C-alpha cells in the first residue's frame, strides 16, 4: 500500500521546528559545562526539507537515510544517539537495520566530547564517563489503542480505527518501543531499559499539544487509507469523510479527552 506510506503524519510545525533536541542540548551543555574540551554537534535527517530555517553556530546538518550505512567519518564517533519518532517512516522489519547503522556511529568509549542529533533520529555524543556510547530512541506505542476507551466512543472511533489501519497497511510497528528494544538485543547493545510514558496524564498544557498533534496526524493519514480500503471512492470523498471525522474528534477533545497514545524511551549501551 505504497500510497498510504507516502503520507508523513508526524511533521513538525514552525514552532516545533525551533525547538530541536540538539540545539537545546548544545545550549544546556555550554551553560552547565562551559570549560570542557571542544564538542562536535552533528544533525541528520532524511531530507534537507526537514532542516530548521536557521542553525546555531557549531552544529553541522547532513542528509542521511537511517536505513543506509553512515559515511566512515561518523563511525565510532558519538556518545549518545537520540532517535525520535520514526514509527511511520520505517517498516517493522527494518528496525534492526536502522539500529545496526546507528550502533556503527556510537563511540566505543565516552572519553571525548562530541554531540550529534537525528531530527527524527536524534544524536548526542561524548559525555565522558562510561565505556560505550548510548543509543536513546523515543517513539510511539499504539499497542493499547484497540482495547482503549477511544475505540468505544463514537466521536473518536473512526479516526482511531483508521490510524490503526494505516499501520496495518504499511506494516508499521504498533509498538515501536518494543520493536526497538528487540532490535537493540539483536544488535548486541547492553543495559537496555524501555520506559513507558504518556502525555494525556501530564497536565493541560501537554494535553493541548497532544490534541494539536493528533488532529494533524489523523487528518493526514485518513484520506489515503479510506481510498485504499474502499471506504471512499476517490480522494474528494475521502477528504469529505475525513473532515467530518475530524470534526467529531474535536467534540471528543472539547469534552476534555485526548486519544491515549503511549510512548516509550528505549536506552542501550554499545559494548566495548
Image (cartoon, rainbow, N blue to C red):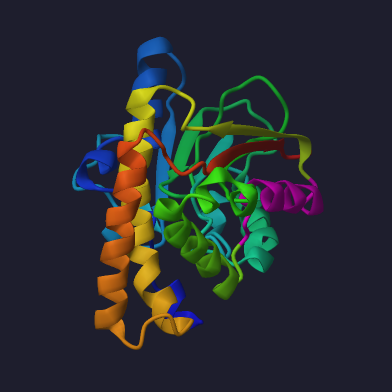
Q: Residue 118, image x and y in percent?
A: 45, 47
The structure residue drawn at horizontal position 37% and vertical position 82%, both measured from the top left corner, is 232
Q: Residue 248, image x and y in percent?
A: 32, 54
Side of 3 where 192 appears, left or right: right
The structure residue drawn at horizontal position 41% and vertical position 62%, both measured from the top left corner, is 46
Q: Is residue 177 magenta?
A: yes
Side of 33 where 107 appears, left or right: right
Tell me where residue 134 sits by quadrant.
Answer: top right
Q: Main secondary structure of the magenta part?
A: helix
Looking at the figure, which quarter contains the C terminus? top right
Which range is magenta? 173-188
The correct choice, above or below, for 180 with respect to 204 in the image is: below
The structure residue drawn at horizontal position 54% and vertical position 68%, both measured from the top left corner, is 165
Towards the viewer: 206 or 118: 206
The correct choice, above or below, for 147 with respect to 191 in the image is: below
The structure residue drawn at horizontal position 25% and vertical position 72%, both measured from the top left corner, is 240
Asked whether the viewer can see residue 18, the reply is yes
Q: Residue 70, image x and y in percent?
A: 54, 59
Side of 117 where 164 appears, left or right: right
Asked whether the viewer can see residue 11, the reply is no
Q: Is residue 218 magenta?
A: no
Q: Residue 187, image x and y in percent?
A: 76, 52
Amino acid at each position: 500500500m505504497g500510497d498510504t506510506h507516502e503520507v508523513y503524519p508526524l511533521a513538525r510545525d514552525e514552532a516545533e521546528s525551533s525547538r530541536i533536541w540538539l540545539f537545546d542540548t548544545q545550549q544546556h551543555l555550554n551553560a552547565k559545562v562551559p570549560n570542557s574540551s571542544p564538542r562536535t554537534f552533528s544533525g541528520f535527517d532524511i531530507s534537507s526539507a526537514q532542516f530548521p530555517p536557521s542553525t546555531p553556530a557549531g552544529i553541522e546538518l547532513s542528509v542521511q537515510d537511517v536505513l543506509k550505512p553512515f559515511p566512515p567519518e561518523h563511525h565510532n564517533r558519538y556518545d549518545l544517539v537520540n532517535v525520535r519518532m520514526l514509527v511511520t517512516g520505517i517498516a517493522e522489519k527494518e528496525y534492526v537495520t536502522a539500529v545496526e547503522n546507528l550502533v556503527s556511529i556510537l563511540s566505543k568509549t565516552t572519553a571525548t566530547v562530541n554531540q550529534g542529533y537525528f531530527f527524527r533520529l536524534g544524536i548526542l555524543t561524548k559525555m565522558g564517563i562510561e565505556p560505550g556510547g548510548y543509543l536513546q530512541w523515543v517513539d510511539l506505542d499504539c499497542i493499547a489503542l484497540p482495547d482503549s476507551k477511544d475505540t468505544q466512543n463514537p466521536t473518536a472511533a473512526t479516526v482511531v480505527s483508521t490510524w490503526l489501519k494505516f499501520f496495518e497497511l504499511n506494516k508499521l510497528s504498533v509498538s515501536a518501543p518494543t520493536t526497538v528494544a528487540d532490535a537493540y538485543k539483536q544488535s548486541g547493545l547492553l543495559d537496555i531499559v524501555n520506559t513507558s510514558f504518556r502525555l494525556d496524564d501530564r497536565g493541560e498544557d501537554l494535553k493541548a499539544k497532544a490534541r494539536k498533534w493528533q488532529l494533524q496526524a489523523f487528518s493526514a493519514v485518513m484520506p489515503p487509507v479510506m481510498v485504499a480500503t474502499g471506504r471512499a471512492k476517490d480522494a474528494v470523498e475521502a477528504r469529505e469523510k475525513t473532515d467530518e471525522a475530524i470534526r467529531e474528534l474535536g467534540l471528543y477533545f472539547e469534552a476534555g479527552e485526548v486519544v491515549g497514545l503511549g510512548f516509550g524511551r528505549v536506552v542501550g549501551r554499545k559494548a566495548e
